[in-house]
Amino acid sequence: MWKGAPLQSGGMTTSNDKRNVRTDLPLMSDDEGNVVLFHPFIPDKAKDYVCDTLSTRWIGQGPKVERFEQKFKEVIGSEQSPISVGAGTDALHLAYVLAGIQPGDEVVTPVFTCTATNIPLAHMGAVIRFADVQTDTLNIDPNHVRALMTEKTKAIVCVHYGGLPCDMQELREIADEWKVPIIEDAAHAFGASYMGTPIGNLSEFTMFSFQAIKHITTGDGGMLMLKDSGLVSKAKRIRWFGIDREAKQGGIWENDITELGFKYQMTDISAAIGLAALEEYPQMIEHRKKLFSIYEKELISIPGIQFVGSRRTDREHGAWLCTILAEDRRGLQAKLAEHHIESNQVHFRNDRYSIFKSYIEEGAYPHMDTVEDQYLVLPLHTKVSEEDVLRICDLVRKG
């Protein structure tokens, strides 16, 4: 039975609890002098690539989408099959459909994640079994995952929070024991690896996000990496109404639809932005990882501060988020804001939302209870300089 860590003061609260609501720290503008929490990475050449696309007959799904899929596969070093879609949420839903999840099936998934991880499961009528987090990584806790597994479990979903890969070896052992697939939400984990293997190579299904503030963006978009190449044709049909698009364009399509699909395809306009970003991926990821390493070095030994996701020898951090646990989070956040530095919480525990209330198990997430009022995300993106990071660390150190 899962017990986890002892409950901290306050324990479980309801979805109507307002203790985390504040109105004194609104979204910061990106005026000169402000260090904002997020900023899109858009290379200058993206404008030219988009303009070039607008002069062709293909502004929807066309040849640039296919080029982007293959370039992305090459950049992340994956041997799996890429399926581009209109959003990371689309990619997750597509993975759930391909995994055969049906109403009433149980899916073990993190309690702490973007709602995009779990909303498609609710739409599908699945039974969401929320698993607690590890306090030092904010990733899903394999010990709780194991305790939640039943004969009704259809899949395990894991999220590589901030860019640090989950404990994939332990999750794989559990998945193999119960004969279920792992679906990786790698929205944060572009450029990460586990035991020398790039994320996007490990599991049956891996989703990447190209939402506006991710490592690279296509405006919005996503990619699903498929381990089983036999699912590629079905995936392509489902992302386009259930129609075999290649056969239709080739003039050999039988005018029939035999399976329900969606409108999940990426456009060539989006792919053009993504192709420009992939060309500058090495410089972008090097910069982010350099900033992350400075944060880690400067913050790891400060009293009252815990650095989340410190690098491990068996995995490489993707450096999307820099997160700390602060004993006085609100005070620190206010102090940073006074110095024109934006910080905030990114994602919230899903059991707080009314839409998931039927899946909540009271008192089942003691680790999440412990860190809920402490985690704080600091700026980490291509517009942040090393000098900015050192100034932020100095402010954190002074308390």
Image (cartoon, helix red, strand yellow):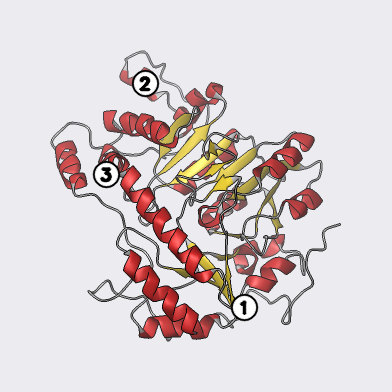
Mark 3 or mark 1: which is in front? Answer: 3
Give the number of callouts: 3
- Whole-angstrom CA distance, mark 1 to mark 2, is 49 Å
**Distance in Å between CA atoms under marks 3 and 1:** 40 Å
> Does any portion of residue 240 appear in the rendered image?
no
Using the rendered view, name the quadrant where residue 137 is placed. Answer: bottom right
Q: Which residue is mark 3?
A: 273
Q: Which mark is residue 16?
A: 1
Amino acid type of the residue that numbered disc 1 sits on in the rendered structure: Asn
From the viewer's perspective, is residue 396 above or below residue 254? below
Question: Left or right of 154: which side holds 340?
Answer: left
Quadrant of residue 387 within the rendered picture: bottom left
Image location of residue 348, percent across then percent down: 56, 67
Q: Residue at x 72, y 51 (%)?
A: 142
Disc 2 residue type? Glu
Disc 3 residue type? Ile
Q: Position of residue 126 (x, y in %)?
A: 67, 48
- Which residue is drawn at the image coordinates 61% and 63% (left, top)? 350
The residue carrying mark 2 is 246
